[in-house]
Image (cartoon, rainbow, N blue to C red):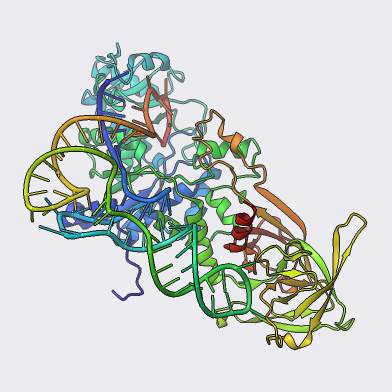
Amino acid sequence: MTNTEVPTPSNFIRNIIDADLKANKNEGRVHTRFPPEPNGYLHIGHAKSICLNFGIALDYQGQCNLRFDDTNPHKENIEYVEAIKQDVRWLGFDWEDRLYFASDYFQQLYDYAVALIKKGKAYVCDLTADQIREYRGTLTEPGKDSPYRERPVEENLDLFGRMRAGEFPDGSRVLRARIDMASPNMNMRDPTIYRIRHGIVHHQTGEQWCIYPMYDFTHCLSDAIEGITHSLCTLEFEDHRPLYDWFLDELETPCHPRQIEFSRLSLQYTVTSKRKLTELVEEGYVHGWDDPRMPTIAGLRRRGYTPASIRDFCERIGVTKADNMVEMGVLESCIREDLDRHAPRRMAVLHPLKIVIENYPEGRVEELEAANHPKDEAMGRRKLPFCREIYIDANDFREQAPRKYKRLVTGGEVRLRNAYVIRCDEVIKDGHGEIIELRCSYDPATLGANPEGRKVKGVIHWVSAHHGLHAEVRLYDRLFNHPTPDAAKDGKDFKEHLNPDSLHTLTRCFVEPGLAGAAPGARFQFEREGYFCVDTEDSAGGKLVFNRIVGLRDTWAKIENQQRG
RNA sequence: UGGGGCGUCGCCAAGCGGUAAGGCACAGGGUUUUGAUCCCUGCAUACCCAGGUUCGAAUCCUGGCGCCCCAGCCA
């Protein structure tokens, strides 16, 4: 190993796989799968699972399937399957020709159910949903047997066949596994494995079926059918593992995959629950699944996050069984690291303040040169028009300088990035005392050279008032103002923790002229501000719209806050 | 009061009986025409607590404590 190589991450799942390989299990194969239900968009928590499953397959020269767990047509939708495929692909993973649907196996699953009935290990139950719940018992008391539990095999076979044939209405009967109503594990108390659902057009199987298998029955068998070796899922399925194993032990299947559970990802100041994200979209709290404030893959993509940064994030947070709550700073650090290296630099003024350089000849325009990246010559250089009138950011000027302030102040000097040193001679205000313009003078000897006999500490960015382009800039902040909006322990609904200032739209920004026609999705660093990308939806037809991906680390803001507090 | 898990730095997380990796964050310093980046330096005598085994314990044993999950014909 050379020292530039990144060591492959170590985690308990890889340790288990290593041990299995050493013990010669599965003929040395490693085969995983990512099994989303197409009932919503993927979020950052799914990214963790995708990176884990596909990442392991890659590192162990194995394979990873994409399998849609589509057993509940009531909630599922073809729009979601397309979006999920796009997201997985965008993250950089390839399922090759192994795109599967649990619904591909409906006939096999049905046959397995029949086999179970024949073994006396499943029965048709006529209890209502409410009755089943009553019979199930509680966490501390055992349940009691259904009156239909002793139904003869022949009758079960007949009834199950008629369930499939559509003879019975929704909710009238279910097929149940016959296990143990007194089990301390609720999942083993004769779980339902098939239910009747009429009048639903399944996105894959249409109206072929009116009975649909449940997750516990479907998942383990789908895994076995596909020859999965390691079935990775989240912690809440740990209690289901005995049931996962029970079906595979009772039935004759091609193999018996090993289920391993890891903890889900929680990220501060957001929610990672499909149900809650759906709520935000459907009730209009955000502008859709791809709203740049959403922790969805689609949202992160539109915000400007790169696939590599998300993969890096998933690697940094690790995989364990411990409950965790990851700080946003980790995600932000990942995208900053990627973009610092790869994003070309540009200048953009977000809060324009006009400057007239009085000793600069009227009508004169200079073409100044600037590097596209301070450390990467290969990214080239660009021309910047400079003239008598420019814009700087209003935050870069103060009439009175606070302590440690090193930007432009009345009577003081500052360096214009990639240009000259200027001095502020006069402040022009309107009738309300608002600063509307600055009169300055420049030092012609300071282009690419330090001024004579004095030090100028500050450097600020600018855009030519005559050449700058109008742009809209959207500044995003955290979606919620509570670190754990859905677990605040204050009795409030998570939506009450929504941050009202999560979006600020600046409509009168100026960007350097070279940004004309910037490609949708293109990412830049606006120097001294942050990383921005051209919005893929709204930036078109000459209208420039930029999303702020993340700000630059801001030590000055920290100092200012300390001075204030 | 049933069952299943988890507890190592502010947040993640390695560690698998031989004397606490790493990342983020934070604090200090250096370079810098981005208060960015980059580069140094510091940051758990300590692994939920209490006992025990051992020459030696975050790792093994016993007993506590705390937190999470489970009573869908959802996944």
Q: Position of residue A41 (x, y in %)?
A: 53, 45
Residue in front for this viewpoint, A289 or A414: A414
Q: How many marks?
A: 0
Front-most of residues A53 and A308: A308
Residue drawn at the location 21% of the way across and 57% of the way down: A28
Indicate left or right for A383 with A339 as reference: right
Q: Is residue A242 above or below residue B10?
A: above
Residue A303 in picture, x, y percent from top left: 60, 56
Q: For the N terminus of chain A, which image quadrant?
A: bottom left
Whether residue A550 appears in this view of the structure is: no
Nearest to the observer: residue A518 or residue A492: A492
**With respect to residue A29, does A72 lie above or below?**
above
Q: Is residue A188 left or right of residue A502?
A: left
- Quarter assignment of residue A281: top right
Instruction: Determine which quarter of the picture holds residue A168.
Output: top left
- The image quadrant that residue A213 belongs to is top left
Percent across and percent down for residue A2 are 31, 76
Q: Is residue A25 above or below residue A164?
A: below
Q: As drawn, is A381 to the left or to the right of A196?
A: right
Percent position of residue A179, x then y: 24, 24
